[in-house]
Image (cartoon, grey):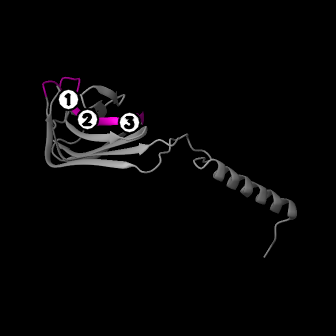
Amino acid sequence: MRRLPAPRTSTAIAVVAAIAVLAVMFPGLGIGQTSTSHGVTPSDVFTRTEPEVCAEVDTFGTNTLFGSEFSVAATSNVLVYFSGERSGRDSETELLLSFAVNDLQGNFVVGTPFEWGLSNNPHIHDSGTVMWSFDAVQPGDYEVVFDARTDPVPDPRGGGNPTAVLENCALTVFVIPVAE
């Protein structure tokens, strides 16, 4: 077995020691990683499911398609997932999805800055999941709502008030307290 020369050995040991010290001092630090927000335990999970049709939507959308109440005990990051099966759209129709968090009086607190647009072959059922995280939600009781609407393609083939069906829906909310 070949041994490394003394200068290489001491350099390698110094690099490993420096990385170990950084890992102990800064537990979330990673080389080449973007900055992240880490939560602490205990985390809460709130889930709502609907095995049948949970909504039929059109171009006018819905105000509360599929909601779930949740509580925040301490300032927390809130991670929301919606999964469902989509069907019934015309080929010239896009389904647009978004999230919002309201207080229990129905007042808007925070929402997604955009809508997710989904399209597919109108003759098949398509499944998928969309998610979004909301940072530093203050303590209180809230409802996360999931909104959907259809949008006809802006050309001669589109138009009218197309509809879409959402079924086999699941809405999951993770409440992860912020590390202080």
Q: Secondary structure at mark 3?
A: loop
Q: Which mark is residue 139?
A: 3
- Up-down: is 147 above or below 47? above
Q: Secondary structure at mark 1?
A: loop
Q: Amino acid under label 1?
A: Asn
Q: Which residues are magenta?
A: 136-161
Residue 13 located within the stretch drawn in magenta: no
Instruction: Check contact, mark 3 vs mark 2: CB within 8 A.
Output: no
Q: Earlier in the sequence, mark 1 or mark 2?
A: 1
Dot 2 corresponds to which residue?
145
Dot 1 corresponds to which residue?
63
Label 3, label 1: how far apart the Cα atoms are: 24 Å
The crowding category of the residue bearing disc 1, from other C-alpha atoms within 10 Å (few below 14, some 14 to 19, many at least 20), is: few
- Up-down: is 164 above or below 30? above
Q: Amino acid under label 2?
A: Val
Q: Earlier in the sequence, mark 3 or mark 1?
A: 1
Q: Earlier in the sequence, mark 3 or mark 2?
A: 3
Q: Which residue lies most toward the right here?
A: 6
Residue 8 place in picture, x, y as percent: 82, 60
Instruction: Check contact, mark 1 vs mark 2: CB within 8 A.
Output: yes
Give the side of residue 25 with respect to residue 89, left or right: right
Give the side of residue 132 with respect to residue 14, left or right: left
Label 3, label 2: how far apart the Cα atoms are: 18 Å
Query: Which of label 3 and label 1 is nearer to you?
Result: 3
Regarding residue 88, the answer to whether it shows in the image is no
Residue occupying the point 63% across, 47% down: 26
Residue 81 place in picture, x, y as percent: 32, 44
